[in-house]
Structures are given as C-alpha cells and as structure tokens.
Amino acid sequence: MSVALASVVRFGSFQLDVRSGELRRNGTKIRVPDQSIQVLTMLLEHSGEVVTRGELCQRLWPNGTVVEFEHGINSIINRLRQALEDSTDDPRFIETLPRRGYRFLVPVEKSTTAPQDPSIAVLPFTNLSADKENDYFSDGLAEEILNALSQVEDLRVAARTSSFSFKGKASEISEIGAKLNVANVLEGSVRRAGNRVRVTVQLVDVRNGFHLWSERYDRQMEDLFDLQDEIARAITERLKVSLSGGVKRSTENPEAYELYLKGRHYWHQRSPATVRLAIQCFEDAIKLDPRYALAYAGLADCHGILRAYSWVPPKDAGPPAYAAVTQAMALAPSLWEVNFSRGFYACYFERAWRNAEPYFQKAILTNPRSSLARAYYGLFLATDGRGEEAVAQTTLACQTDALSPFIHCLTSLALYTLARFDEAERMAHHALELQPGYLLGLWAHGMALCGLGRNDEAIECLERAVTASRAPNFVGLLGLAYARGGRLDDATRLLHELEDRSSRGEYVPTIALLHINVGQGDLPAIRGALSKALAEGTPPFVFRPTSSPFLEAYRSDPEVNRLLLNLYGR
C-alpha cells in the first residue's frame, strides 16, 4: 500500500527532498539521474514491501516496450545503488527479488509531518474590497509582513513566490504546510473603503489546523505602517521568536508607499505592458517622495527587465536605468534591493559586467533569503564559467523558493550556460510542472532540449513559446532549433522574418539573428553578428547565457575566437 511521505525523508546518512528530487548524504548533494530518483521515491513509498518490476515499468515507461524497460531498469537500479553505496550481495537499502522486483529495507516516515523549527508561510491576503483592482494592495500588505518576519534570525519564512503560488486556490492548510515545509501559516483578508482599511488575520498550526491567534484591525490608511509592525510583533510573540526593530521601509508617505506596492505588483508579472505600468507607478511614487530609494530601485529593475528580454533597444533603457539606480545607491546603499538593482544594471548595461559581483554579494549578505539575488548571482557565476559556485547559489535559490517557476527558469538558464543540459532540462521541466504553459519555462525547456540534441521536442516547445509571443529572441531560438533539427528552410524563413521586421523599424537584437546564424553554421554571418555586438557595446551577460554552448564550437575560427575574446574578456 502506498503511503504519503514526509517532505524530507531520512534513512541512514541520506536524506531525500521529495519535492525537489534532491538526494543528499550528510548534507552534501549527490547527483542522481531523475529516473533513479523516481525509483527511490516509489521504493520509499512502499518501504518494507515488494515493488514489482511491472509496477516500476508502468511508472517509468507507461507507453514503452518490455525491451526498453528490461534494458533500462537494471541500469537505473545500479546507479541508485552506487549513489547509496549499496551492494547486491549484502544490501543495506535495496533488496532484489529475482524475477519479481525490489524492496526497500529501511523503515521511513509514513505520513506528512510539520517541521519542528519556528517556520511560517504568509499567504496572499484575500481582497474583500468592492474594487477588485485592490488586489495589489492586499498582496502588498501580506508581502510587507512577510518581509518583516524575514528579518527575524530564528524564524524560517517561506519565500514570497512560493507562498503566493497558492493565490486563488482552495488548498488545505496541511497541504500548504507540507509543500512549503513550514509549521505555521498566516492567512488574512483586507477590506478597503476610502481611507479606511479592515485587516483580519489568523495564525494557523498546520499540524492540527488550530488557530494559534487571530485578530481584526480597523485603521486609517495613514496608520498602515504601524499596523504592519503590530501584526509582525504579534506573530513573533506567538512563535516565541524576537523581532528586533520594526518593518524596514524607505518612505513615510502612505500614498508613495501604495504606488510602490502597485508597481511591484505589476513588475512581478514581467510582460512589456505590465512593466510599463510599473514604471509609471514608481515614477509617481518618486514625485510624492523624491527620496524613496526603493521606488528608484524598482524603476531601475523595470528598465533592466526591458533590456534583459530585448523588448527595447539598450539606448532607450540604459539612461533611465542608470539615473534610477545611481539615485537609489546614493539614498540607501545598504538595502539589499538597491544592491541587487545595481548588480542587475551592471550585468545588462555595462561592458565591465563583472562589476556586478560585489553588489550581488552584498545583497545576499544583507538578505540571505533572497532567492532572486541568489538566482541572478548564480547566472552571473555561470556566465563567468565558475560552475560549482554557480550551482551552489542556484541550488540555494531553489531551496528557498521551491515553488517559483521563475527561479527554476533562471537556474535552468545557468545550467544551460555551463552546458549541463540534463540538469537544465529537469529544472525547466519542473518550472512547467509548477506553471503549465509558462512562457519563460517553454523558452528554457526548449533551449535545454536543443542542447541535448532532442530537436523535435525542442521545436515543439519553442513553437509554443513563439505562438504565445513573437518576441524576436523567441523567434531566433526557434530558428536555431529548426536548423539543428535539419529544417533549414524553416530556419531561413524565420531569419528573413526578423530581417524584415528590423527593416521596418522594429528593434530586433543582434542575438536573435545570431541564434539562427549559429544553427545554420553560417560562419561569415556569425562573424558579422559578433562584430555588430561589439560595436553596440553589448555586455557578454546578454550573449553568453543563450549562445555560448553553440558558439564555442566556432572558436577554432581565428576571427570568431578574437571577437569572443574581446566580448567575454577571455
């Protein structure tokens, strides 16, 4: 009989994180193929019982043949035994029953259990206001309380993206606690009418569903900051941890603060239209409080996103990004958000892109729980060719924000940059499991599949991305996949499409054309694209995470090698 496993299962010196599929021994991660992890999970679910070869076949190869299964299962079990340092003759963990199946010999936990350390998830507050556009306000209030609790050294707080993934879902508290690996959940609602706001909150123990504390607050908008402090202190008192100071903020203007919440609400959606709405919100907040450092940081991040996704030319995004991030650094150089913004700017706008490193490091030192800072720092390290450091940072980012498809996409991109295509594919696949149809997930998955040479699958994935958005970068990557899959006519068709769009005045980044040039093996065009990138002052951070695994094959050409040395600095 199958049983529910704890989120982390321990046996001997090993532990398996069931959600992420990561196996560790004494805290050190062990690389194990995904199918071996699936087999281990199934054996753990049936610990002490026989798992038949037929059951394993149905789980791993539901549409496969017996020959495929017989050839594959022995290899999978052998790799799993190697990872566990187990043996067939004297098994400690996995026993083979000839012609029948396998049995896991060590008892494991039979039910989901909550962690014992002080831990909490803050769910997005329900908007009960008549105006449903106030979602940004209720979300922002919950996020600010989450940020305040994150300042408590002895309290583990689930990341925003993971907690907010439950927005609008009728999930049981026990399920939320298990998926986020927390002992407590804070849920609430907000009703706003004019200048008055009513906030109702409940702190719930996930082990039994009991309310540890609940309260209703009726306040004026100008009292909002004090209300956040009050709620955060009440929670820490119930959990017997200490909150030093109050909620850290860089404005005392409630209207500017509300505009900042709305701006971040739009920024998190990361589309051209919502980023422009966010820019307007941040600019309006700055008009109300010209010393609002976080609003300047948000403004810089918006222009950085427009550049990173090649939605606007660098000449349009660079100057306002520089002005905003410079002002943010002048006002609040110690804030993690400001240091992240400065590092983000360096990566996407400066040829001396390695200047970003100390800013990412300071952001992480100031806020070790920022999955965003860690994921981008990991991508930075991958771009710099520092593989193990990159993987360490991206692993921590995914552990901190286990349910974030965006963080998993950044991690996939870092692994792709390092040509670790198997791992990149798994990360991108997981992002799509978290959010089916996620545009960045389709992009990352298609790239990883292309790296693996699974070109038909890559084409299918990238065609879906291009159907959702004909952004030039997506079109260029699809052209690369077409070319690598032997569909040269289709690749040429997309190349002509991008050239035509450029001739009509649309911004088409050089990298979009380079993708197709590389797929076609057009050496003169590759040289031309790289020369143009250098002339435009393109930072290698823009090129390397998407082009380097295939561009490296052309380094035998002296001119390509010279251009790449100039571009990358090595």
Image: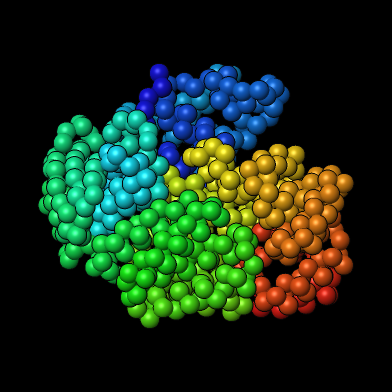
Image height check: is 493 above or below 275? above
The residue lying at 28 percent from left, 34 percent from top is: 173
In this orientation, which residue lies closer to the viewer: 164 or 244? 164
The residue lying at 31 percent from left, 50 percent from top is: 137
Q: Is residue 74 left or right of residue 264?
A: right
Residue 359 at x, y percent in the picture: 44, 74
Total marks shown come to 0
Q: Is residue 443 left or right of residue 283?
A: right
Name the image quarter holding residue 272: bottom right
Residue 45 at x, y percent in the picture: 42, 27
Residue 468 at x, y percent in the picture: 63, 43
The residue lying at 45 percent from left, 67 percent from top is: 299
In this orientation, which residue lies closer to the viewer: 298 or 157? 298
Quadrant of the snapshot with the C terminus:
bottom right
Query: What colouring method underlies this structural image?
Result: rainbow
In this orientation, which residue lies closer to the viewer: 283 or 340? 283
